[in-house]
Image (spheres, rainbow, N blue to C red):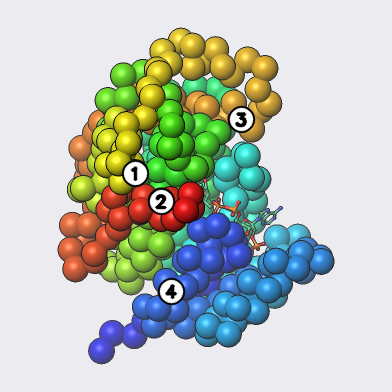
Amino acid sequence: MTIKSRVLVVGGTGYLGKRLVRASLAQGHETYILHRPEIGVDIEKVQLLLELKQQGAQLVTGSFEDHRSLVEAVKLVDVVICAISGVHIRSHHILLQLKLVDAIKEAGNVKRFLPSEFGTDPARMENAMEPGRVTFDDKMVVRKAIEEARIPHTYVSANCFAGYFLGGLCQPGHILPSRDSVMLLGDGNQKAIYVDEDDIAMYTIRSIDDPRTLNKTVYIRPPQNILSQGEVVKIWEKLIGKELKKSSISAEDFLALMKGQDYAEQVGLVHYYHVCYEGCLANFEIGEGGVEACELYPDVNYTTVEQYMKRYIYFYL
Ligand SMILES: NC(=O)c1ccc[n+]([C@@H]2O[C@H](COP(=O)([O-])OP(=O)(O)OC[C@H]3O[C@@H](n4cnc5c(N)ncnc54)[C@H](OP(=O)(O)O)[C@@H]3O)[C@@H](O)[C@H]2O)c1
């Protein structure tokens, strides 16, 4: 029997982080969560930590402001997964991970580090537009530090979190699908890739002890979930038994929307632009430095777009 790595999740109370913790426990890993004293009186976080602890996770205290505490935390485990925030409309702390990289380098015991990525492959976004490119640029700064420190790693390119993209029928600023109307981005025909967040966590944990993913990018591309906005809308229409009223917005008008928006919203709009107008997620073949999760783990029954979207029907009942 192979021994399962011990895992530390940093950002374990976050939107993706808590799913990573649960998936790690479900797959039988001894699982630690970094508990940051900066939690203050955030009652939701404390309750979540208690819940995750009851499910079997262990808490280890450490702060990004205290290098020694990070070194001691990473010394407890074989694998470190970071899910620190990186969505401007929530919060964005990708570069804080440089402190984690320093700690992992000093500790010297970590067999695999998975930085907070879980989206578009930043290595493919060198021509991304301002100001949205900050997400990709910051993630590349972290990659460079990891590689310079010669830390064994895996980068997970998870494509679109289903909750953001399917929930809003691929419209920025929406996370619930309308039963009446939808605005198509351009002709709505560019393919994107949608992944249930729990599946992202499951595939991520599957990859951590897998030699095939060492120093590689794992792309999560569930074959049935490579769909255009128009196809997503059709699935929703079928589920609600009704056709939506459709309008569309040209690329120029979409970009013009950025004027007058705050910085965080502009960043988000640029991401939608690259995904929905340029098709940046699905318009390339995975090259030598990459592997595809559904091919690596064909036994996983991933959630299809239709299965995922069924939950929204109940929302309106
Ligand atoms: N592909 C997509 O569609 C998509 C969508 C959303 C996010 N993402 C990516 O997924 C990753 C995780 O994002 P998320 O939305 O799950 O993150 P999140 O919930 O916004 O935040 C995750 C964690 O970040 C930590 N954090 C926040 N502020 C901090 C600070 N000042 N100092 C230290 N830690 C701080 C907290 O960890 P504690 O638990 O320690 O408090 C928090 O729980 C990011 O890389 C993001 O870019 C991708």
Q: Which residue is mark 2?
A: 313
Q: Which mark is residue 265?
A: 3
Q: Which mark is residue 240?
A: 1
Identify which amino acid the numbered label 2 is placed on: Ile
Q: CA distance from mark 2 to mark 4?
A: 30 Å
Q: Which residue is mark 4?
A: 24
Q: Residue 1 or 243: which is nearer the viewer?
A: 243
Question: Residue, x 40% and y 17% (percent of image)?
Answer: 248
Q: Is residue 274 left or right of residue 56?
A: left
Q: Is the residue marked by circle 2 packed among few (<14), some (14-19), or many (20+) residues within 10 Å?
A: few
Identify which amino acid the numbered label 1 is placed on: Ile
Q: Is residue 51 above or below residue 20?
A: below
Identify which amino acid the numbered label 4 is placed on: Ser
Between discs 1 and 4, the one toward the N terminus: 4
CB within 8 Å, label 2 to label 1: yes
Q: Is residue 224 left or right of residue 6?
A: left
